[in-house]
């Protein structure tokens, strides 16, 4: 549980010492079960940031809680909810939920991501971290009008259950869209998902067993790394290079016989990279030879700012091994919770069996509305609009970075997507920079989050889609100030630890 969510609307007052108010609030959350036995609490520095108090105040709050038996402080490990008070004040028949839960693999970035969540409750904060479209351009009005204009045509049965693989008119509509992009498929090869993240999870769920090898490009989408690791997969990383490392991939295929490769060939998250057209053909040929399944995640290919990107891997698939995954969260609005998968019927049928255990089917009213939206030509109009808006924001961010940081940062201007991937050219840590940046009211994602194993800590991702040009410029200005402050605090970059592959 992220404590920042529990106390996002809490304000301290002058009625009593701040440390007692903080302690009282945490006590209440432990008593009502919101915070459970063994749960890790924020570090003292994070707690101080959350309440905007001094670190001494945070320390005193924890000491007060420790004295009353609510928490235990373990040197070098952290602060945890204690079982001494809870077990002594509840029924002997209380369910021991912490002992019943399966172990949860906590990534090395968990505490850092928690700190970002803490910073979200602060006012005047500029978020350059979340990979989201701008809510000001969600086509809410169009969807509302479609709903009102067409509601009378709906049969009451349309509000009931539909087939697990989705609303048939929408699946047919998607096959027509994909045909224009060179992907020829039948509606039975399409399943509608509650966002592409569900498709990623379901694919891994039906293919991956503990100990199986999975290949990723590095850096890559954090959510994919977490899914694979949570299922016990052993992750093999392809390094970031100007050209796709086919020779390393072939070595992995011959040596480890992996089941699956996950990739974002077009405007990769986080670095905006593109696998070139010729390399895509070679990748398909190599994968076919070794019978490697490829999970092609494609959330950004329609958000391009220069040339139309190369054809998808799925359009080149001549051996039935590419699983194509896309979403409407990045192009329209995340709240639709709609994505889709295209794959060989054998896999689709297995995905459908697994999906029924999760949600029976994705929201049918959303699917009906989305089908109308595409049918009446609104999707193309919307894409044209946001391409112009986000291209301008990309250019403003790039200009601001060049003006503020000059040679202190290296970055490439992406041809599409939402992100600019930066590398610090000085002996500074991106995680330390984030800590300093949060104090100035701006946030980003450190590069370590996008690697399966900890690496050199000099990279970070900035998102330019969520804010207008004025806010972006102010965010980069704050980031520059944070770096200048950090440079006055000497520290060393830890060397990357290379572990032998087992």
Image (tube, rainbow, N blue to C red):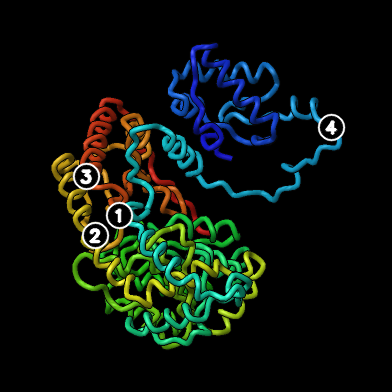
- Tag 2 and tag 1, C-beta contact below 8 Å: yes
Label 1 or label 4, whichever comes before in sequence order: 4
**Residue displayed at 62% across by 49% down:** 104
Q: How many marks?
A: 4
Residue 74: % across, % down: 61, 27
**Residue displayed at 65% across by 70% down:** 356
Kindly identify which residue carries mark 1. Answer: 419
Q: Residues within 10 Å of mark 1 (few under 14, many from 20)?
A: many
Label 2 or label 1, whichever comes before in sequence order: 2
Kindly identify which residue carries mark 4. Answer: 91
Label 4 or label 2, whichever comes before in sequence order: 4
Quarter holding residue 176: bottom left
Q: Secondary structure at mark 2?
A: loop
Q: Residues within 10 Å of mark 4 (few under 14, many from 20)?
A: few
Depth-wise, is mark 3 or mark 4 nearer the camera?
4
Which is more toward the observer, 154 or 481? 154
Depth-wise, is mark 1 or mark 4 nearer the camera?
4
Residue 11 is marked as none
305 left or right of 44 in image: left
Q: Secondary structure at mark 4?
A: loop
Q: Whole-Å distance between the Cαs marked 3 and 4?
A: 58 Å
Q: Residues within 10 Å of mark 2 (few under 14, many from 20)?
A: many
Q: Residues within 10 Å of mark 3 (few under 14, many from 20)?
A: some
**Residue displayed at 24% across by 67% down:** 384
Q: Whole-Å distance between the Cαs marked 3 and 2?
A: 15 Å
Quarter holding the N terminus is top right
Q: Whole-Å distance between the Cαs marked 4 and 2?
A: 59 Å
Which is more toward the observer, 496 or 34? 34
Residue 414 is marked as 2
Residue 357: % across, % down: 67, 67
Residue 409 is marked as 3
Depth-wise, is mark 1 or mark 3 nearer the camera?
1
């Amino acid at each position: 549980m992220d404590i920042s969510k529990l106390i996002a609307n809490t304000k301290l007052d002058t009625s009593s010492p701040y440390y007692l108010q903080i302690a009282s609030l945490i006590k209440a959350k432990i008593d009502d079960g919101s915070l459970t036995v063994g749960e890790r609490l924020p570090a003292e520095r994070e707690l101080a940031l959350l309440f905007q108090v001094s670190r001494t105040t945070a320390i005193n709050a924890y000491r007060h809680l420790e004295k009353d038996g609510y928490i235990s402080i373990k040197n070098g490990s952290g602060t945890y909810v204690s079982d001494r008070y809870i077990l002594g004040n509840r029924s002997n028949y209380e369910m021991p939920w912490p002992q019943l839960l399966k172990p949860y693999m906590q990534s090395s970035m968990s505490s850092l991501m928690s700190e970002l969540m803490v910073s979200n409750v602060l006012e005047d904060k500029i978020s350059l971290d979340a990979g989201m479209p701008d809510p000001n351009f969600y086509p809410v009005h169009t969807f509302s009008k479609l709903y009102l204009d067409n509601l009378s045509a709906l049969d009451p049965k349309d509000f009931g259950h539909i087939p697990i693989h989705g609303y048939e008119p929408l699946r047919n509509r998607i096959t027509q869209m994909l045909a224009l992009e060179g992907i020829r498929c039948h509606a039975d090869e399409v399943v509608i998902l509650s966002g592409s993240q569900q498709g990623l999870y379901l694919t891994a769920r039906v293919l991956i067993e503990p100990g199986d090898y999975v290949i990723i490009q590095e850096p890559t989408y954090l959510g994919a790394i977490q899914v694979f690791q949570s299922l016990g997969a052993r992750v093999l990383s392809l390094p970031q290079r100007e050209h796709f490392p086919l020779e390393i991939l072939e070595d992995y295929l011959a040596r480890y016989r992996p089941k699956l490769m996950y990739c974002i060939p077009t405007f990769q998250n986080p670095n905006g990279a593109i696998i070139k057209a010729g390399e895509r053909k070679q990748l398909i040929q190599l994968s076919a030879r070794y019978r490697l399944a490829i999970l092609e995640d494609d959330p950004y290919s329609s958000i391009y700012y220069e040339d139309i990107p190369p054809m998808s891997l799925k359009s080149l698939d001549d051996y039935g091994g590419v699983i194509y995954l896309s979403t409407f969260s990045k192009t329209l609005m995340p709240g639709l919770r709609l994505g889709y998968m295209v794959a060989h019927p054998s896999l689709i049928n297995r995905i459908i069996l697994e999906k029924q255990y999760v949600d029976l089917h994705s929201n049918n009213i959303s699917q009906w509305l989305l089908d109308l939206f595409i049918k009446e030509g609104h999707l193309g109009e919307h894409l044209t609009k946001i391409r112009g808006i986000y291209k301008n924001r990309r250019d403003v961010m790039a200009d601001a970075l060049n003006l503020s940081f000059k040679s202190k940062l290296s970055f490439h201007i992406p041809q599409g997507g939402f992100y600019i991937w930066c590398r610090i050219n000085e002996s500074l840590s991106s995680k330390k920079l984030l800590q300093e940046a949060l104090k100035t009211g701006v946030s980003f994602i450190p590069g370590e989050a996008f690697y399966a194993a900890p690496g050199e800590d000099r990279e970070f991702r900035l998102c330019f889609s969520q804010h207008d040009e004025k806010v972006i410029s102010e965010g980069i200005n704050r980031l520059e100030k944070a770096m200048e402050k950090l440079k006055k605090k000497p520290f060393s970059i830890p060397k990357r630890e290379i572990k032998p592959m087992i």
